[in-house]
Image: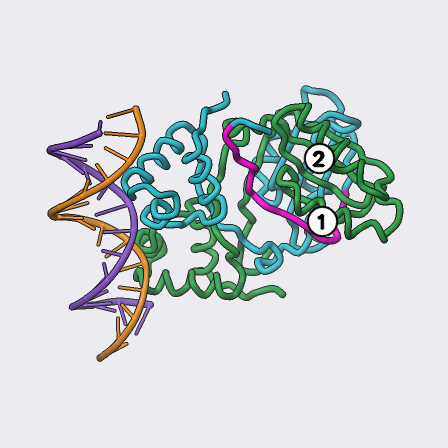
Chain colours: A cyan, B green, C purple, D orange
Amino acid sequence: MQISLDTLDVKILNYLLQQGRITWAELAAQIGISAPAAADRVRKLEDRGVIQGYTACLDAERVGHSLTAFIAVTLERPEHRATFLERVHASAAIQECHHVTGDDDYLLKVRCRHTRHLEHLISDSLKSLPGILRTRTTIVLSTVKETAALPVSTSSS
Amino acid sequence: MQISLDTLDVKILNYLLQQGRITWAELAAQIGISAPAAADRVRKLEDRGVIQGYTACLDAERVGHSLTAFIAVTLERPEHRATFLERVHASAAIQECHHVTGDDDYLLKVRCRHTRHLEHLISDSLKSLPGILRTRTTIVLSTVKETAALPVSTSSS
DNA sequence: AATGAAACTGTCGGGTT
DNA sequence: AACCCGACAGTTTCATT
């Protein structure tokens, strides 16, 4: 599943992580190749699935989502998984859903407008589903760091 | 802190969340205004801090980070916070750090290459710090959903 | 917010190492 | 196979209405 990346690919990825809308011309100038060559490499990284797409980074508070929370969910039995995952995909407030080890089955990261919105999400969207044994909610008081950047490098740790 | 967004702003943000490198010309065509008008609106959204930037979405596995984990950290006393937060900012493997309610103080989201890398992060980078009372690590087995998209809308829930 | 002109960028061909 | 160069279509940007 892992892809071999050379030094230039790594530089390109790190630039695109910081400036997702950088022009191929500027990117090429930064890494010392021509614009078509840079565009070619980016296209190949996209084709190989390394780059899945591009997105704008929004300030959650400024778009009215001042409340972030993590919700740990425990399912009663595996047969209720499908219904639960459907709801996860359907709910826009749920940004992430991970199947995890530990006391609980799933860990959700959610963005809400206010506590009422969170209450609705927990009570009406999640706990109303069949087979939800329990949920444990952890409220985010403040976010110290939040980046989409992965530490991309060629091969070393 | 919240910003007033009209219908066009919301449409623009939702397009930019899905296609961060869309051209102003195409964006403008989609929402029914001229290209300069679209560019103006985007620029204003950037100036108001709603759009903080743009980034490429990478496949973590394909860049060699097959292991995702959440680490809950409890500090002994508040005076150790500064040292801890420095380390958080310095470590590229730590993608997120949230100050949270509950049994623990901080919740980290980390991306590692393999278990050895995670072991190093926990033992050498975190537990070696003064004032770290304990850490609880939750391994991600699989990720069901992971999106940067916020449910942007004008004002309703 | 729309229009039109100028500068720039992306892309496609061909050619090179 | 990867890259560079040159050229044209498309895009961004600015001034103007």
**Chain on which label 1 sits:** B
Between residue D6 and residue B17, name the one nearer to us: D6
Which of pointers 2 and 1 indicates the residue nearer the eye?
Answer: 1
Q: Is residue A134 left or right of residue A23?
A: right
Between residue A154 and residue B48, name the one nearer to us: A154
Residue B86 horizontal/vertical position (percent): 71, 49
Numbered tag placed on residue B70 in the rendering: 2
Three-letter code for the amino acid on which mark 2 is drawn: Phe
Same chain for mark 2 and mark 1? The answer is: yes
Q: Secondary structure at mark 2?
A: strand
Question: Is residue A149 a member of the stretch shown in magenta?
Answer: yes
Residue A37 horizontal/vertical position (percent): 30, 37
Q: Secondary structure at mark 1?
A: helix
Q: Is residue A157 left or right of residue B5?
A: right
Label 2: few (<14), some (14–19) or many (≥20) C-alpha neighbours in 10 Å: many
- Please name the residue shown 70% across and 42% down the image: A124
Residue A130 visible from this viewpoint? no
Q: Is residue B70 left or right of residue B80?
A: left
Numbered tag placed on residue B25 in the rendering: none
Could you tell which of marks 2 and 1 lies nearer the N-terminus? 2
Q: Which quarter shows the C terminus of chain A?
A: top right
> What residue did someone put label 1 on?
B86
Q: In the picture shown, does residue D6 fall above or below B46? A: above
Between residue B29 and residue A150, name the one nearer to us: A150
**Chain on which label 2 sits:** B
Label 1: few (<14), some (14–19) or many (≥20) C-alpha neighbours in 10 Å: few
Residue B148 horizontal/vertical position (percent): 55, 44
Q: Which residues are magenta?
A: A138-154
Residue A30 visible from this viewpoint? yes
Q: Quadrant of residue A43?
A: top left
